[in-house]
Amino acid sequence: MTAEIGYAMTAVALGLALYGSAACAIGARTNRPVLIQSAQHAAIGTFVLIVAAMLLLVYAFLTFDFSVRYVAINTNRGTPFYYRITALWGALEGSIILWSAMLSLYTLLIIVRYRSRQAEFYPWVLSVMLGILTFFLLVMTIPAPPFERLAPIPPDGRGLNPLLEDTGMITHPVALYLGFTGFTVPFAFAMAALITGRTGDEWMRVTRRWTIVAWYFLSLGLLIGGWWSYHVLGWGGYWAWDPVENAAFMPWLTGTAFLHSVMIQERRHILKLWNLTLIILTFGLTIFGTFLTRSGILSSVHSFTQGSIGAFFLGFIALVLLGAFGLVAARGDRLRAEGKLDSIVSRESAFLLNNLFLVAAAFTVFFGTIFPLLSEAIRGVKVSVGAPFFNLVNIPIFLALIFLMGVGPLIAWRRASRDNLRRNFLAPVGAGILAAGVFRLLGVANALALTCLSLVVFVAATIVLDFYRATGARLRTGERLLPAMGGLLMRQNRRYGGFVVHLGILVVALGVTGSQAWSIQTETTLRRGEALQIGQYNVRFDGLAASEESNHFKVTGTFTVANNGRALAVMTPAKKFYPQEQTPIAAVDYLMGLREDLYLVLGDFARDGSQATVKVQLNRFVTLIWIGGFILTLGAALAILPEPRKT
Amino acid sequence: MRRAALALALLLPVLAWGAPPPGAVNEETVRQIAAQLRCVVCQNLSVADSPSEMANQMRGIIRERLQGGDTPDQVMAYFVEKYGEWILLSPRPRGFNLLVWTLPFAGIGGGLLVILMLTRRWSRRTRERPVAEPVDPATRERIRREMTELGQ
């Protein structure tokens, strides 16, 4: 029965969303508020139905209702309670429900916030959002129904992909999807602006904070994804340039470009066309990402399902791009900007370059990700485009971006005078060069690491300098130090939120540089009682233990670790054997530190426990990535706060 | 230093007349080669990173081949012959593959050119039209007077 009820709910939700989208458009066109009102009700109904369908599916998971095919595939009687809930988004069908739920939540928020404001944009925004929701509900009814019935009902299910049995999988998809769907809001406003012909800066001002919300969640999703990769996948890395990661990274890059370039339009009223292009691309990439990761077109860690929904998604992407750029073309006359620029040495130029490099990075990731498909289609030869390629091509781009991160916020608008340049950049550039020298003397030989360190110090110096001066100005008005600093953050939260984000990125950059340049690893087979030495650590193998868990069999190694002869810890990396998986899953154990993580992966072992292979890594400075990520999200949160009214 | 070690690692077997002592292969060389190869059973990990048994065996093959006197290039060629170009994590920069290597940089170059042209055209437009009307002396005098009044 569950399957039928659930299916009926999604089908009705589809009808409501479709109706609402059309009613809004007609209501706006013919100026009939009744229709818009009715569309509003339809949108609320859609939200309620989707949430109800999602809860029904959760209920089916919790009660092991194997008459629902999706439940039978993604859980079994051994799956722990906790993961029976998150199994909801363990595969394509459930992910689409999650996506729809998030999107309808945003739609609801739009209704709550704008139903009596933004009278011109509102009906069109609602119409566009419901239109996009219609597509996802269509996917849920035709090619990938989560409520498909399974007959006969099997006694037990297959089970969740063991890699997803992790706390990271509770938060990662939610954050990521809140980010993806969040970009629908600025996109919908952009479309509304084009449809109504009010192509000024208003749509951008209204959606500024929405965009940062989306960016915040997307960043958080990426970070949690990296964390998950680091502590679950057992290879000691946080980013593999896997197509799935790339799929989430591309809209992040173009979204970041958009966040920056809107500032130029707000200030100088140029780049209208470019900003529209960026938000269309960003939104298109969020859909493309889902297509890439969930259609099974590329095989990768996250593509657990192979489906026939590729055509649906490609069709929708084509529709979105044609429709959106068609509108842009139709409004071309209003978008031709009175481009005005005073000098090439100006903040405008710095932002243009920032946009160029961010989009170039997005393009590199995009082209690299789809290139294997191109090669196979055109040459008939399968090739791989992996980490060595992406690292090589992207590193210069990212270094340029870090440099611009220092230049952009401090260089003057319009025309930077020689005095402005000297005042803002002489000291930071000096600090950067000095840092390079100091690190060189400290023994850093890697040229890339030196360049990155030097740039990080340069950018950090610009931020500190600006904050120092601004605080100084407030102190002179008689404020005390802490209120002055707090007031600066709160009253100019947009600017200083941005600076905090930049600081976070710098810390992440240090972590990435450090881990790439100085991590070491070794892999050895040890007999019981035998030890290996890595850095100042001594790792001794003390034996194996086997245990029967609720849904798998586990072999745990015991390793006693000493630091410079002092006993430090007993570490227990393990291997988990799931009946539904052919190969065992590694459960790593690690000791985290600010400077380095000691990271143990259990390899092969003798059945009698007399010997085992272990991979030991000293991952340097990886912790900085998590700290930097945390700082970054704090900064984004600060920038989301409403700007205090200017009096 | 690394290169010297590599040369030494490659020379040793020759010096020992084809009977290499175990452990003569530089593990760093093995790792560098392994980092360029795709683990054939994994989703998207290199042979160097993958914790899988298959990757372990492949690292063993790299070690053996190096010990047998192969150069790193020959080791890579061996894997390409066995599994096809797909095994290489970064496509060899030749023929059609040149596209993926050059297009991003061509894009950046083109973009720079566009930005340069636009900024030049836009700044010329600004120069032709002064941003603000010059303030006439009478108004300027009034502003000055009112400012001083405000200051008192």
Image (spheres, rainbow, N blue to C red):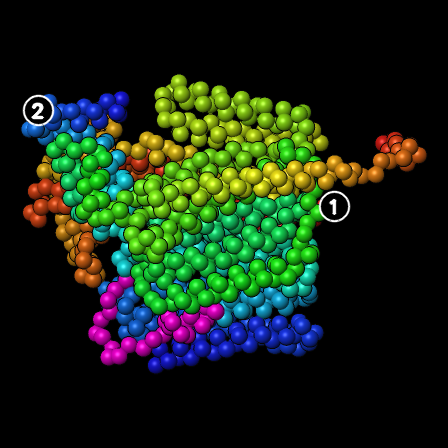
In the rendered image, the residue lying farthest to the right is B138
Numbered circle sitting on residue A647: 1
Query: Which residue shows up at 22% across the image and 51% down it?
Result: B41
Residue A64 seen anywhere in this rendered image of the structure: no
Give the quarter of the figure containing the N terminus of chain A: bottom left
Q: Which residues are magenta?
A: A135-160
Task: Kindly state the secondary structure of the residue where label 1 is placed.
Answer: loop
Q: Which residue is mark 2?
A: B16
Query: Which residue shows up at 39% across the image and 45% down it?
Result: B100
| CA distance for labels 2 and 1 | 84 Å
Q: Main secondary structure of the magenta part?
A: loop
Mark 1: amino acid: Thr
Q: Is residue A573 magenta?
A: no
Left or right of residue B104: residue A387: left
Residue A551 seen anywhere in this rendered image of the structure: yes
The vertical placement of A501 against A431, above or below, is below
Residue A445 x/y as whole percent:
36, 23
